[in-house]
Image (spheres, rainbow, N blue to C red):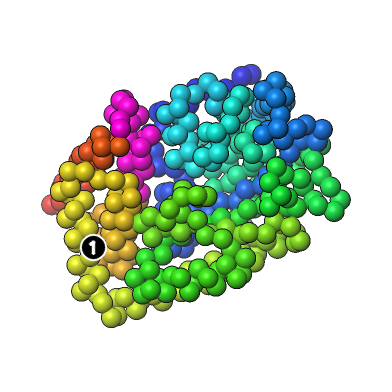
Amino acid sequence: MNKEKRGCLDLVKVVPVWFNNNGPESDVVVSSRIRLARNLDNHQFPFQASLKERKTVFKKITEVFDSGAQFKTFEVINFSRLRELEQQFLVEERVVSPDMLKMDGDRGVVCDSSRRVNIMVNEEDHLRFQCIDSGFRAQEMWEVLDMLDDTIGKKFKYAYDNKMGFLTCCPTNSGTGLRVSFLLHLPGLVLTKSIDAVLQGASQMGLSTRGFFGENSDVMGNFFQLSNQATMGSHEQEFVDTTCKTISEIISNERKARERVMRDASLELSDKVYRSFGILTHARTLSLSELLNLTSALRLGIHCGVFDAFSVEQLNRIICMSMPAHLQIHRSTAMNEEELSIARAELVRDLLAKKRRRKKSTQSLK
């Protein structure tokens, strides 16, 4: 049975599972992600391998998911058969990493129907297992990924050294090959000017900080992505536990900061929220960075109880549909940056107006 499919274009209007805001502690933790890097023994790493060898490895790995009954909900997506816009769509959905776009030849992703569990094939390493979901739930995700790793590990011999552990393309991933990452929304710590001290403390506890789209991306909309730096020297479970402990402390600090903002500057917060709402409903151009910053204020206003015109789920849907590849696929046309800014502003105005009309209509029926 060949489960290879062309893409996910029918999913443009569907909010990815990691962004649906129904997970625990989701007022602060937008999403949790656990990733495991593995390589096949006796094969060159993808960066060093010829196109022929990459093709062989891709075929070997994806055939496992085509034949196993336990993988019947998984589909194989070969990047070499996707348009650039479709590839970018999967990056925006966080199904694959931006590095996947830089590779050549047979590479892609095996993903389940919800896109919660994905396996990148022939990215930096032969296999990058990933589980991503909404809210703070790293422990249950680790159990899912550990089981998947054990299952696939019975099909192949992994590249492994008795002293180094699992061997990976980048030495910083060797050992366990494990990365535990959390996308956090921390406006309270930013507004109270405590963010630098908190991130410095997290760094001392072994966590690195990145932007909304991960490595090499800027911080936008008060979204910070934190993940463990070390992958060697402890068992996987210990890395999960220690990282979660630090994240729990950051969640507590963020909530205290929000309480402080509400106690000392509730009028300023309310003003900031409604000014942001005014810009979103009237702007004629909007960059993605502006959108994330403005909706960040609304998101904080919702959680602090000073804004109730929309839900966080609705804001997430607007952000999702406003990303460049999503927007171009939704409009069925290629656009430059200026055209994207204009189209994004139009889309946001339309979506916010529709949701306000529906809310008023619902209220009038009560």
Query: Where is residue 263 shown, x and y percent of the image?
Result: 29, 80
Residue drawn at (48%, 74%) of the image: 197
Query: Where is residue 244 shown, x and y percent of the image?
Result: 59, 64
- Residue with the mark numbered 1: 273
Residue 333 falls within the magenta-colored stretch? yes
Name the residue nearer the viewer: 115 or 78.
78
Q: Is residue 50 visible?
A: yes
Name the residue nearer the viewer: 270 or 112.
270
**What's the residue type where badge 1 is placed?**
Val
Instruction: From the viewer's perspective, tell me whether residue 1 is left or right of residue 201.
Output: right
**Predominant secondary structure in magenta?**
helix
Q: Quadrant of residue 333?
A: top left
Q: Quadrant of residue 167?
A: top right
Residue drawn at (64%, 42%) of the image: 129
Instruction: From the viewer's perspective, tell me whether residue 29 is left or right of residue 291.
Output: right
Residue drawn at (48%, 31%) of the image: 87
Judged from this view, the residue extending furthest toward the left is 364
Say few, some or many: other residues with alpha carbon within 10 Å of mark 1 (under 14 / 14 to 19 / 20 or more).
many
Judged from this view, the residue extending furthest toward the bottom is 264
**Callout 1: SS:** helix
Magenta-colored span: 315-336
Query: Where is residue 55 shown, x and y percent of the image?
Result: 68, 22
What quarter of the picture does the C terminus occupy? bottom left
Q: Is residue 68 visible?
A: no
Above or below, comparing residue 155 to residue 352 in the picture: above
